[in-house]
Image: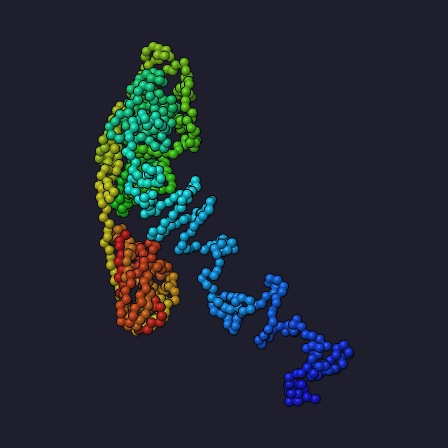
Amino acid sequence: MAKIENTTVYPTVTPAADDLLIATDVSNNNETVTFLVSSITGGGGVNQGLQSVLDTGNTATQTMTLTGSVTLLGGAGVGFIDLCQVKLGGSVGAAGQVLTSQGAGSCAIWATPAATSCCTIQSTLTAGNTTTLDFDTTGSINMTGAGKILSLSNGTIATISGTGSNLTMGTNSDIFLGNTSELNFGATATINDYSGSTGAIGQVLTVNAAGTGIEWGTLPAPATPPLQQVLTVGNTATAIGIAFSGPSTTTFDTTATISSSADNAWLGTNTFSANGTLVTTAGIALIGSLWDGVSTGSVGDVLTSTATGVSWQPTTGGVTSVTAGAPGTSTGTVTTITPTTGAVVVTPNAYAGGTNIGHVPTGGTASNFLRGDGTWQSIACCNLQDTLTAGNTATTSIVLSGLGIEVAAPCGRFTTLEDGTASVGTAGQVLSSTGSGLQWVPPGGGAYSWRFGANDGSWLTVSNGQYAGVTGGTGISAADSGTGSLGDPYLVTLTNTGVTSVTAAASGTSTGNPLTITPTTGAVTVASNAYTGTTNVGHVPAGGTATTFLRGDGSWQVPVADNSSISWNRDFIGSTVSLTASRYFTYLGADDANFDTLYNRVSNDLGAAMPTTLSPYNHQPGFIFWNTHSGGCGVDTDQLRLCAADFQIITDVAGTFYLDLWKGDPCDPDVAFLTAASCTITVAGGAIGCCTATLSGLAPNVTLAPGEGFFFTLRVAALFEGNFSGKMALKLLPQ
């Protein structure tokens, strides 16, 4: 029996309703039976629903044509048609067209939406009134209705820009600015009044005469009130003072007083003529501590004249003599004074650098200058004025250490002032001496006690109503006179039989010692002598400027830098060479086999990387410049610095060349090389290429100490086979 697939035996025909089909009846023991084709499609047979068809297979490559409707059930996301394209009347539409209904009984079409066929702004805002995009319009934005607000928050700025742009407010419209809001105007912005005027310089905005608008107007000239009227209106000023200039006098009558809780500076000459003996009649009523310019003194000290001021001095002993000691070296202070009583020796100390202040040390010459470490060097430095001119603001503190350090200024301005306990005090407190420092304390008053030092080292306290006897001592004689009581006390006369005064004499010129002290007792004068060079120590002489420096011979000079430079030139060639890319080559020189006489030929292959050390045969030929070891040229020329390097090359074949200088030791192959200068030249065949080398930013790389030199290498970017000739030029400066 032939197979059904044999269409010759079993030809293919169009089935009819009464055609028979062979099948298996699974309900009757799989008996073979026949049935009509019509039994499958209808009649008494089993109807085939769309679900059963789709269950069998829901994918087809043929077109499905329906004359009825397609109804989708199941709700959103369940009943839908997933289409790639929709054809309407055979058209899939054009980009941007939308599906448009033509009414009942007509087919929908693809149509381009009209410009106005979208939606109103109300419907858009109802759908969503928040956007991150800019809103641009060429029309107007009108806000009507009471209580409407244009709110700009979170630092948003309303900008009205462009020529002729205006912000127009309608009738009864207001602009409200909050407590911290600002109304900012640009550099060229103007304000128009009701007439359209932008006003003139000095005019102010004011209400017009009719009271109907704002206009630019000129204020009337103000009348000058007398001082009494001003003070009657208000006699308190905040954060502002009064400055008087020119000859004038401010007078206070007997009923007027000055009360100040601040720190006050009296820079001129002030006269206190009252000589009463009571706190209300004395010329000076001192109820706090007294600063002598250095300290408030110690307990028991007396205030002594220095001829130009006053100074707290102990009363336990006098000065019998003052002599000058041999100059020493400073360890912080400019002078060493020991002892402080009796035979006093004043020793001047030489400046030793840093905070070790002192006089100019010996050793200066006409060619050197004093450096900040206290040594004489042949370099120029700078003075304090130069430093402050460059920049007088710093974020770090200035710390002055050592005894005798002073800061003199015509004016001092302090936000706070700490005492010895690091306290800034409280309102109304005053600074008082503790004997060893200062402390903020409440203003004094009441009874006082005096303390005297006894010979046994203990303290003797004399309180109110008691007497103290005074006897003479070393350098001081004492005598009491008069009779009296507590209201009319005894008079005590103290006579200094040692040094009665120490004054500064006019400066002189040093002949060896920075100080001249004469005599050693009585009215002693101390003259400071100016430095005159070499061993004649003394203070810095007058005459310096911002452009001069003190020379070692004691004269002010404008340093002249040694700008004399050294120029060095060297050739290099490659004759019929073959150079591999990215390898380092130097002068051929000598190798293991022979010594080439062509000294400037560059073909010696050092490898793919610059070696840290080289063999002697490769090390020797590459050095093109050698700074000789120290000789008789002087320290100023022993060290050289590379300040410029130029390279030039010509080839018969185009190529790119990398040219390098290395710092090393010509006599020691084990010393590692440092990069000194680099240059790249790309040149066409038959053309000259030039470049200025880039120097290493590290000073050690470009500075040659005695015995150091520069080593030359050449690399190519690609294989080079041909000829080249080049030159290099170096410029060096003595250091």
**Residue 643, image x and y in percent?**
28, 56
Q: Quadrant of residue 407?
A: top left
- Quadrant position of the N terminus in the picture: bottom right
Q: Which is more toward the observer, 224 or 559?
A: 224
Residue at (33%, 68%) from the top-left corner?
Answer: 656
**For the point 40% across and 43% down, which residue is it?**
182
Left or right: where 283 falls relative to 438: left
Examine the rendering and report whether any part of residue 593 can be seen: no
Residue 481 is situated, as x and y percent measured from the top left of the image, at 32, 12
Protein image colouring? rainbow
Residue 266: x and y in percent read 31, 28
Task: Please determine whether, in this image, residue 131 is positioned above or below residue 554.
Answer: below
User: Where is residue 288 drawn, in percent x and y?
Assistant: 38, 24
Q: Number of callouts in the render?
A: 0
In this rendering, the answer to whether 50 lies above or below 457 is below
Q: Nearer the viewer, residue 584 or 87?
A: 87
Q: Nearer the viewer, residue 97 or 695?
A: 97
In the image, residue 43 sits, relative to residue 354, either above or below, namely: below
Identity of the residue furthest to the right in this view: 29
Q: Residue furthest top?
A: 483
Q: Quadrant of residue 630?
A: bottom left
Residue 386 visible somewhere in the drawing: yes
* For residue 573, side relative to residue 55 (left or right): left
Q: Which picture quadrant has residue 386?
A: top left
Question: Residue drawn 69% across and 74% down?
Answer: 47
- Along the line of sight, the residue nearer the viewer: 26 or 547: 26
Q: Is residue 94 above or below residue 25?
A: above
Q: Residue at x 29, y 23 (%)?
A: 251
